[in-house]
Image (cartoon, rainbow, N blue to C red):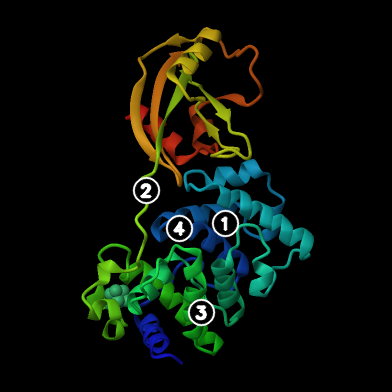
Amino acid sequence: MSAFAQQLITWQREHGRHHLPWQCDDPYRIWLSEIMLQQTQVATVIPYYERFLKRFPDIHSLANASQESVLEHWSGLGYYARARNLHYAAQQIYQEHHGNFPQTRSALETLKGVGRSTAAAIAVFAWGKREAICDGNVKRVLARHFALNIDSTTTSAQPIFWQLAESLLPHSSEDLKSYTQALMDLGSLICKRTRPLCQQCPVQNTCQALARNAVSAYPKKATKAPKPSRDGYFLLCRQPNGDILFSQRAEKALWGNLWILPWFDTEQALQAFAHQHHMQAQSKMQSAFCHVFTHYRLNIHYQEYYLSTPQLNGTSSTYRWLSSTAIQSAALPAAMKKLLNLKRS
Ligand code: SF4
């Protein structure tokens, strides 16, 4: 076994995390946690994970649920494509694998939304398979420990990272589980993206970035152009009973299938829509905050309106009035919740 793996295993058994709610050998629970943990911190995930599991305790309940119900239980966690893929993959498992989880990394990778690293994590924790994980956290650890002078985000760097990750794997299934968990723990607790805790690191003696006093120089990244920004104008229209008008996004659109305040590209378009439906303005257009998507920044503006009747003549069924109770459980993106909370505070 590599010295790197040995040190990590010893450290994990003594200092690592052993009581996370998904630390078990149930592939469904491991899969769910792996998907939720993509781009989201452990502390944020835990309450969502528990709530989701209560409603969808197994693959059967998830595969048979409506997409709307799955999105509702994902609401607020962000990156909703993960929830749609999860739902789709549950149906794949049902239809293509008779409800049984595939047991090899390559078969797991055929499930929608399951990449190589996620498939490897499931294969290791559920079945003790000898597979390497190599997500963003692991790449950061490897890039620093081995002082890799390659941009970890490029396509050409990927085989180098995967080969290195595989070469470090221990052999026994118990060691594999501890080692894989150790890499996850190290990446999230010690070798953090900013301000890594090198003095507490179990591999500090062999870390080449630390030896060169150049930890912040790794992983190497090409300088990126700043994200473009655009403006979005949101209509906040209330009825006399306080219900608020929402519209549902198209499935393939950004925030696909989620409910948002009606969104317009220009202030004029918003006001023309309001005028067409006899809404009365209650405020001027106001700037709220900037929401950052993967590819651009959205400056969110909103204007409040009032409509004395629930009728919206000539509009499609993608519009719906939601009460404050319905809003609590509806599938809303985090940016919309933030905007509504802003209005409440
Ligand atoms: Fe990361 Fe520091 Fe440990 Fe090196 S010594 S692996 S930079 S935490």
- Circle 4: residue type: Ile
Q: Which of marks 2 and 1 is nearer the N terminus?
A: 1
Q: What residue type is labelled 2?
A: Ala
| The residue at label 2 has a CB less than 8 Å from ligand 1 | no
CB at disc 3 and ligand 1 closer than 8 Å: no
The numbered mark at residue 161 is none
Residue on which disc 3 sits: 163
Q: Residue 177, how many percent across, how many down?
A: 51, 80
* Residue type, numbered disc 3: Gln
Locate residue 200, reporting x and y percent: 25, 77
Q: Residue at x 44, y 62 (%)?
A: 153
Q: What residue type is labelled 1?
A: Leu
On screen, residue 42 versus residue 322, left or right, reads left
Residue in the picture at 45% in, 81% down: 179
Q: What secondary structure is marked by label 4? A: helix
Q: Would you say the residues marked 2 and 1 are in contact, meaning their CB atoms lie under 8 Å apart? A: no
User: Spatial distance from mark 4 to mark 3, Cα to Cα?
Assistant: 32 Å
Position of 87 with respect to 267 (left or right) is right
Per the rendering, the mark at residue 225 is: 2
Seen in the picture, residue 253 relative to 310 is either above or below; the reply is below
**Mark 1 Cα within 10 Å, few/some/many (few <14, many 20+)?**
some
Q: Name the residue under label 4.
A: 46
Looking at the image, residue 3 lies above or below residue 67:
below
Relative depth, front residue between 157 and 185:
157
Residue 238 seen in the figure: no
Give the CA separation, mark 1 to mark 3: 35 Å
Q: Do the residues labelled 4 and 2 touch (CB within 8 Å)?
A: no
Indicate left or right for 337 with 223 as reference: right
